[in-house]
Amino acid sequence: MNQHDGFSQPSRHASLPRNESQRDVVNRLKRIEGQIRGLIDMVQTERSCEEVAQQMAAARKAMDKAFYRMMACSLMEAVAESDVEGSAMRDVERSTRILEKYA
């Protein structure tokens, strides 16, 4: 696993999904960074605890989704690197979308 990006080194077959997933995770983290800055501002301007809590919950949920997306990439890379047929990859992709949506 590469220490700098949180993704393992791609095989030739997995590089396209990896690059797309990496961009997606980075974009999600940048949005979360903005949410955190907003939270800091909310605390400093003494917004109500309930408003801050609501935004903290949203940021935590966004962080969870970024984590699930990164893990989905890991699963897809594992399948892509194996000698598994294309239908298995589609099943993994469908399962990871469900995980991202409902986890």
Image (tube, rainbow, N blue to C red):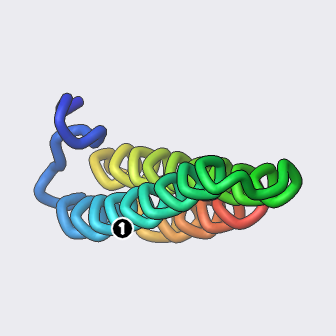
- Give the amino acid at mark 1: Asn
For the residue pair 47 and 80, the one nearer the viewer reads as: 47
The answer to whether residue 62 is left or right of residue 90 is: right
The residue that appears at 54% across and 61% down in the rendered structure is 38
- Secondary structure of residue under mark 1: helix
Question: Residue 16's image quarter?
Answer: bottom left
The answer to whether residue 73 is left or right of residue 19 is: right
Residue carrying label 1: 27
- For the residue carrying disc 1, how many other residues have a C-alpha within 10 Å: few (<14), some (14-19), or many (20+)? few
The residue that appears at 83% across and 55% down in the rendered structure is 48
For the residue pair 46 and 31, the one nearer the viewer reads as: 46
For the residue pair 45 and 12, the one nearer the viewer reads as: 45
Q: Is residue 86 above or below residue 32?
A: below
Furthest residue toward front: 45
Question: Residue 13's image quarter?
Answer: bottom left
The residue that appears at 47% across and 56% down in the rendered structure is 37
Q: Is residue 37 above or below residue 31?
A: above
Q: Is residue 90 visible?
A: yes
Number of numbered labels in the structure image:
1
Q: What percent of the width, then of the height, locates residue 14?
A: 24, 58
The residue that appears at 36% across and 67% down in the rendered structure is 27
Q: What percent of the width, then of the height, locates residue 61?
A: 68, 54
Q: Quadrant of the N terminus?
A: top left
Furthest residue toward right: 50
Q: What percent of the width, then of the height, locates residue 6?
A: 30, 38
Question: Residue 29's image quarter?
Answer: bottom left
Q: Is residue 65 visible?
A: no
